[in-house]
Amino acid sequence: MAAQPNLVRVQEHGQVTLPANVRKRLGFKEGDLVAVEETAEGVLLTPRGVAAINALSEIGDALREEGLTLDDMIERGKAIREELYREQYATTDPDRS
């Protein structure tokens, strides 16, 4: 038998209070960030930490599809940093203060 849904009222400014038992089970605490996504079934709330992990996973998948590694990205970032430093300060040593 399926659990009965918790009914909550939409308040001013679209605020909705999640029932305490749901917040506790999901580990939501005051001040936590959650990602809000509209789905075909309704609205999906995801703890921001989980959303960040999912986004990083998608980025990793995209890099692998392109044949790139994390080391490739780090090296490319260093090269871009050096180029920007040269343009800004007319020198080749980005570690120079």
Image (tube, rainbow, N blue to C red):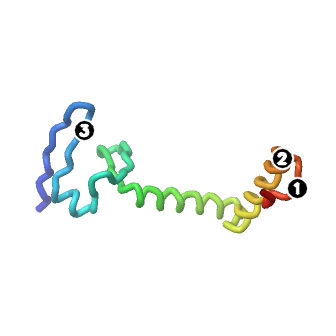
**Distance between mark 3 and mark 2 Cα atoms:** 50 Å
Q: Which amino acid does label 2 sit on?
A: Tyr
Quick one: SS at disc 3?
loop
Q: Which amino acid does label 3 sit on?
A: Gln
Q: Nearer the viewer, residue 28 or 43?
A: 28
Q: Mark 1 points at which residue?
A: 92
Disc with the residue nearer the chain's start (3 vs 2): 3
Quick one: SS at disc 2?
helix
Q: What residue type is labelled 1?
A: Thr
Q: Name the residue under label 2.
A: 89
- Quadrant of res 93: bottom right
**Are the residues flagged by discs 2 and 1 in contact, CB closer than 8 Å?**
no
The picture places residue 88, in percent across and down from the top left corner, at 81, 44
Q: Name the residue under label 3.
A: 15
User: Residue visible at 11% across and 62% down?
Assistant: 1
Quick one: SS at disc 1?
loop
Nearer the observer: mark 3 or 2; the answer is 2
User: Residue visible at 88% across and 55% down?
Assistant: 92
Q: Which of 27 and 96 is in front in this view?
A: 96
User: Residue visible at 81% across and 55% down?
Assistant: 82
User: Residue visible at 20% across and 36% down?
Assistant: 10
Neighbourhood count class around disc 1 (C-alpha, 10 Å): few under 14, some 14–19, many 20 upward:
few
| Residue found at the far right of this picture | 91
**Are the residues flagged by discs 3 and 1 in contact, CB closer than 8 Å?**
no
Q: Which mark is residue 49?
A: none
Nearer the observer: mark 3 or 1; the answer is 1
Neighbourhood count class around disc 3 (C-alpha, 10 Å): few under 14, some 14–19, many 20 upward:
few
Q: How many marks?
A: 3
| Residue found at the far top of this picture | 12
